[in-house]
Image (cartoon, rainbow, N blue to C red):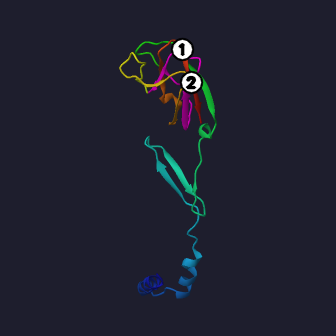
């Protein structure tokens, strides 16, 4: 590295005869004077095209921040399933989450079925994961609880969710 720098300066001096070697030594920092560990900002692009800054600190550690909605808050709630036809389902309310655990309450009189937007009870063509009274399902990793849908075998049954 030292040799390449000196060669460059010699060539520079040939093209510029008034070049001052003393000035060059003062103006060019030595490699030992350069801090290569300073914090640098780079960016990542999400699948939706949103640019998100990515940062590292002076030690090279990745610095991560989470939106307030996903700060580790714990949610638990109950969702009633009022209708029981083969195409009747309920979308779980929207909450930003990391994961959810589902349970069929002990008071249910029939099974509940967990799945996506096309889930059905046992009389439909896309029967979801069946939970009988007291059964649990999960932990399911997802970013919003509204990706989940539930259907029931008996009107008025419910599902409980525990999410973070």
The residue lying toward the viewer, choosing from 141 and 23, is 141
Q: Is residue 22 above or below residue 114?
A: below
Residue 134, numbered circle: 2
Residue 31: which quarter of the image? bottom right
The residue lying toward the viewer, choosing from 42 and 127, is 127
Residue 131, numbered circle: none
Q: Is label 1 in a helix, a strand or a loop?
A: loop
Query: Tag 2: Cα neighbours inside 10 Å, few (<14), some, or many (≥20)?
Result: few
Q: Is residue 28 visible?
A: no
Which percent across, then down, holds residue 131? 49, 24
Q: Are marks 1 and 2 in contact (CB under 8 Å)?
A: no
Q: Is residue 60 visible?
A: yes
Residue 26: which quarter of the image? bottom right
Q: Is residue 149 above or below residue 22?
A: above
The residue lying toward the viewer, choosing from 160 and 39, is 160
Span highlighted in magenta in the image: 90-115
Q: Tell me if residue 107 is in the magenta stretch.
A: yes
Q: Is label 2 in a helix, a strand or a loop?
A: loop
Which percent across, then down, holds residue 99? 54, 36
Q: CA distance from mark 1 to mark 2?
A: 11 Å
Residue at image point 35% right, 20% down: 125
The residue lying toward the viewer, choosing from 83 and 94, is 83
Q: Is residue 162 above or below residue 16?
A: above
Which percent across, then down, holds residue 144? 52, 33
Numbered disc total: 2
Tag 1 residue:
109
């Amino acid at each position: 590295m030292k040799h390449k720098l000196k060669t460059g300066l010699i060539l520079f001096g040939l093209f510029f005869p008034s070049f001052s070697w003393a000035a060059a030594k003062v103006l060019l920092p030595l490699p030992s004077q350069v801090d290569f560990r300073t914090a640098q900002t780079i960016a990542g692009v999400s699948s939706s095209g949103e640019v998100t800054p990515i940062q590292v600190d002076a030690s090279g550690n990745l610095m991560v921040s989470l939106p307030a909605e996903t700060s580790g808050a714990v949610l638990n709630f109950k969702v009633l399933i009022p209708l029981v036809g083969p195409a009747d389902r309920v979308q779980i309310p929207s909450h930003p989450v990391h994961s959810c655990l589902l349970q069929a309450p002990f008071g249910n009189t029939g099974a509940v079925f967990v799945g996506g937007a096309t889930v059905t009870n046992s009389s439909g063509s896309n029967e979801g994961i069946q939970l009988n009274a007291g059964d649990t399902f999960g932990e399911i990793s997802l970013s919003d609880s509204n990706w989940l849908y539930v259907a029931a075998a008996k009107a008025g049954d419910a599902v409980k969710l525990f999410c973070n």
